[in-house]
Structures are given as structure tokens and as C-alpha cells.
Amino acid sequence: MCTYKREHLRLTLQSIARLVIPQGVDVEVLVVDNDEQLSARATIDAFQGDFPHQLNYYSEPVKNISAARNKLLEKARGDWIASIDDDEVADELWLLRLKETADTYAADVVFGHVVPCYPDHTPAWIKEGNFFSRKTHETGTELSSGGSGCTLINRLFLEKNNMKFDVAYGTTGGEDAQLFFRMFCRGAKLVFCKDAIVYEGVESDRLNLSYLKKRALRVGQTYARYRLEQATVAQKLWFTVKNMLLLICISIVSLFSYPVNKQLFLKLYLKALDKYGKVACVFSGAKVELYK
């Protein structure tokens, strides 16, 4: 996992210590600290000795999430890399379910199920709108991309194809989705596992409309960036026209929904921002930075 000034790291490591390990699997835990002040070192040191697995700590002083993730790829020795974020807690069967799914479906990447956990002071409209839940699928469903916060990755596939995270996405996010899409284009099989669960704590500074708007724009922009990297002129044109039409239609429907259902209006508004981000990226290459 990668970490940056997050006290929750302690809870993440505690959940890893409780994992049920698949038979015949040896586990090595790698933590890359992306803080040049090495703020996570004390936490790692506190776990040394009593931790049930080998625990290795590395520093990546360049503040770039792609650089930090690439440090993990560089240091990892196992055939598989199980990736978890430092704001998540793994279910005890998380690793077991990921590995079972990879074996059953001959997959190169398995995406698990991320469940949001809200602090007590979360506004009711956030919970009711379910704005931090992610799309789920039946186990074995094949996908073309995904995130890295609850994921099992075939490291040998990456090594064979000389693939790593693109540092150009290191301050905007989307570096994981871009890498997985490139793997998909190279023939990797990506599947979902609904029973491999991690619980993600939603931070207080994200419980507001400002963050949701920024995230919607960023998701749209990064999607357009990595999906269109190898696209033809015709494909880019169709992508732009389609998303412009969707932007117009969603915007109109959202206006009519406002007096009737404000939750629906907000969801449509954020979806319109996603489409706007995609179109804006095509015309201007605009990027919203999340990691500064």
C-alpha cells in the first residue's frame, strides 16, 4: 500500500494482520511512504516484531502517487500484488476471495468490493444519496478497467509487458484506471469479485458538494485522457459528440428534476459534470489535480 500522512494506516495494518491467508501463499507487506518527512515510519516501527508477516517500509519523496505505486512494483517480489489504500480496512476473507476468484476465472486482475463507512457527523443527504458507493457486479464479471484500492494484480503480467503507472497521472489520480485499461488492451483479463470486501473510511473534508463536484470533473477528465490516448480521429469525434449530447440531455432533465427530487437533481448534476469533464478534456486537455 501507499500512504501519505494518514493516521488510519494503523487500522489498515491491523486488518491485514487478521487476514485469512490462502493455502500455499506467503505474504509480504510493503508500505511506501509518499511523505518526504517519513511520517509513517513510526507507525511501521510500532508493528515490527508482533506483525504476522514480513513488513517492509520504503520512502518515495517525490510527491506523486504514480511514483509511489511504481516503488511498490519495483520492490515487490511475489507473483501477485494485493493492493489496498491506507484509508481502508480489509475483511478477514479479502485476500482469500481475491485469490480464489483469480484462480477460478484465470484472471490477471481482480477488483474487489469497496464499502464506504461514514463518520457520525455525516450530513443526511450524503448518506441518502449514496454518493460514495461504487458500482458493483456479480463475481466473475469481466471489466476493462477499475481502481487499485481493493485489487489483486498479476505482477508477472506487468513485468512481462514492461508496464508501470504513468507519472503524468500522479497529481490528478486515475493512474490506476489508466494502467488497468492498458493491461486490458494488452490482453489481460480483468474481473470483479463482490465477496472480496474492504471498508473505506470517508474523510470529513470530503463530505460536501465542493468535493463531489471536483471529483466528478476529475473522473470525467481522466477517463477521457486514458481512453483516448490511442484513439483514432473518428473515435475521438464520436466520443466528443456522444458526451456533448449526453451533457445537454442530462442538464435538461436535471433542471426539471430540481423542484421534484433534489437528490435526483444532485445526482444528475454530478453526472453532467462528469460529461463536461470529458468534453473539456478533449478540447483543452484540462486537468483537475487532487494530489498537490
Image (spheres, rainbow, N blue to C red):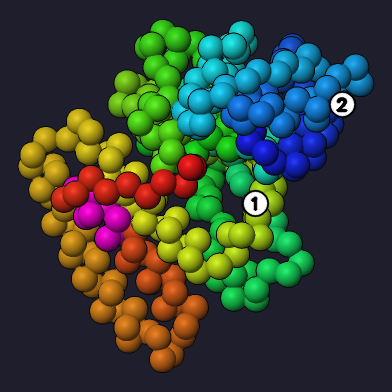
Q: Secondary structure at mark 1?
A: strand
Instruction: Indicate the amino acid at tag 1.
Output: Val
Q: Which residue is found at the position 36% from the left and 56% from the top?
A: 217
Q: Is residue 147 magenta?
A: no
Q: Nearer the viewer, mark 2 or mark 1?
A: 2
**In the displayed structure, does residue 109 sit left or right of residue 243?**
right
Mark 2: which amino acid?
A: Ala
* In-front residue for pair 31/191: 31
Which of the numbered marks, if any, corresponds to residue 46?
2
Front position in the image: 243 or 213 = 213
What quarter of the picture does the N terminus occupy? top right
Question: From mark 2 to mark 1, how far is it between C-alphas?
Answer: 28 Å
- In this rendering, is residue 61 above or below 121? above
Among the two numbered marks 2 and 1 on one chain, the one whose residue lies closer to the N terminus? 2
Side of 56 relative to 215 (left or right): right
Image spot of residue 9 (x, y percent): 74, 37
On screen, 140 above or below 153? below
* Residue hosting label 1: 115
Q: Magenta region, mostly helix, strand or loop?
A: helix
Q: Is residue 193 above or below residue 106?
A: below
Residue closer to the observer: 107 or 127: 127
Please say whether residue 143 is visible from this viewpoint. Answer: no
The residue positioned 21% from the left and 71% from the top of the image is 248
- Residue 232's mark? none
Q: Is residue 281 within the magenta segment?
A: yes
Q: Residue 72 at what x, y percent from top left? A: 57, 19
The segment highlighted magenta reads 275-282
Taking 141 as reference, is 202 above or below it? below
